[in-house]
Image: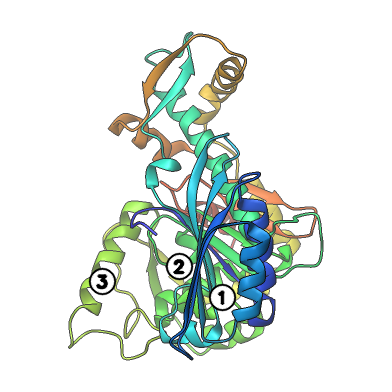
Amino acid sequence: MSDGSPYFYAWCDEADRVDAFAAAMSVLVARGATCNVDIQSIDHPDVAWRRSIPIDEAIAAVRTAFSSGTYVFASLPVMLSSGSIVRFAVVCNGDDYERRGPSGPLCASPFDRRDLFPWSLKIAIGGSIGGVEIEAAIASMHVLQDIEDLLIRVCAPEAHVRVKCVKTGACVDVGDWGAPAEACATYHADAASVARDLALSWVHLYEGDKTALTAGMSLELLRTRIDAAPHGACVGIASDIDLVRQHMRVDWATAASRETRPTRVDAVRRRARAPIEGDAKLTRETVLKVLDTPPSLLLDALEASAVPDDDWRSVESTARETIAATKDGAPTYEADVASRKHVQFIKRHSPFHVRRLPSGGVVLATHPYRTLWPLWADALFVLGIMT
């Protein structure tokens, strides 16, 4: 998988992992396409390479070979909801393999970042020519639609079915599965467990644990760990993607030094993450209050907070009309949607979505240039948990 591409992570019990892998592969693959699959294990030296085989054959091979020490790498063409076909990688790890270097038991990512973040778009000619805000809104809508669709296909490939393999998942634009509140999208098989976003964020930021290993913990166990922190304990949480990247660079530099590198394979640092300028504050008491809040109230507050701002609302209808005109075959022009002005508009105004699934799950999502923390912060303000 290439550095810098969005990663879609999913957590499920090892007993369900091949089923989750099979379901995700089946709904991700473009119709009629084949895939490549590599299977290896820390338990023996044998490696299996299969090229250009049907999905069913690849899944059967993984079912036969999968054990706790197995690493599976598959590559396949995927059709995005926006219509383009891109190359994806899907990784599935057994628990023993994960413990040696936690990276996520099930993970998918495009090979090229530009496959999800195009530098230019064909846009219908009209009043939007030269309208940076409208062009940026159109680009944001395309990307957010793809992100939500892909996360659901990885985590809940049959989103209407209440039998679920994957318990939680996330989409991140920084490579590693870090604090869910700093991701651009999260999935929960049970909407009642949406507070897991903040509980896992605290454990990752305060104790340094890799989320790939803690994601499946019960809320009760997570609460016990949070409650064990001293009263008044506080961590900094990144309110935008640029701050997340700054923190990632600090973690990488720390891990590169013998004197400061983590002493546990399941950790990204030895102690609580140091705050940097621009971080918001997340306290132990805030997270505990969130865990004590009835899930229905929490979801209502998140939905109430996912209201687009005035700048977005002023261009949204025109952007949707332009998208429809483009699909209907109207004359188009090539718009550069990767300029600084386009990116800044998306970072400041791209909306948040709270999507309740027919299965009883929920997806929180925004454009990968943003993080979910502003949505959470507004929801906690609505509930009176934060001021």
Q: Can you say which quadrant of the picture contains the N terminus?
A: bottom left
Residue 4, placed above or below residue 322: below
Find the distance from the CA under tag 3 to the CA under tag 1: 22 Å
Q: Kindly state the secondary structure of the residue where label 1 is placed.
A: loop
Find the distance from the CA under tag 2 to the CA under tag 3: 14 Å
Labels 2 and 1 touching (C-beta < 8 A) = yes
Q: Earlier in the sequence, mark 3 or mark 1?
A: 1
Labels 3 and 1 touching (C-beta < 8 A) = no
Residue at horizontal 32%, vertical 81%?
269
For mark 1, what is the residue?
A: 215
Residue at horizontal 38%, vertical 83%?
267
The crowd level at tag 3 (other Cα within 10 Å; few <14, some 14-19, many 20+) is few
When asked about the image quadrant of residue 254, the answer is: bottom left
How many numbered discs, if any?
Answer: 3
Residue at horizontal 42%, vertical 86%?
100
When asked about the image quadrant of residue 301, the answer is: bottom right
- Give the residue type at disc 3: Trp
- The x, y position of residue 216, in whole percent, is 61, 78
Mark number, residue 252: 3
For mark 2, what is the residue?
A: 177
When asked about the image quadrant of residue 205, the answer is: bottom left
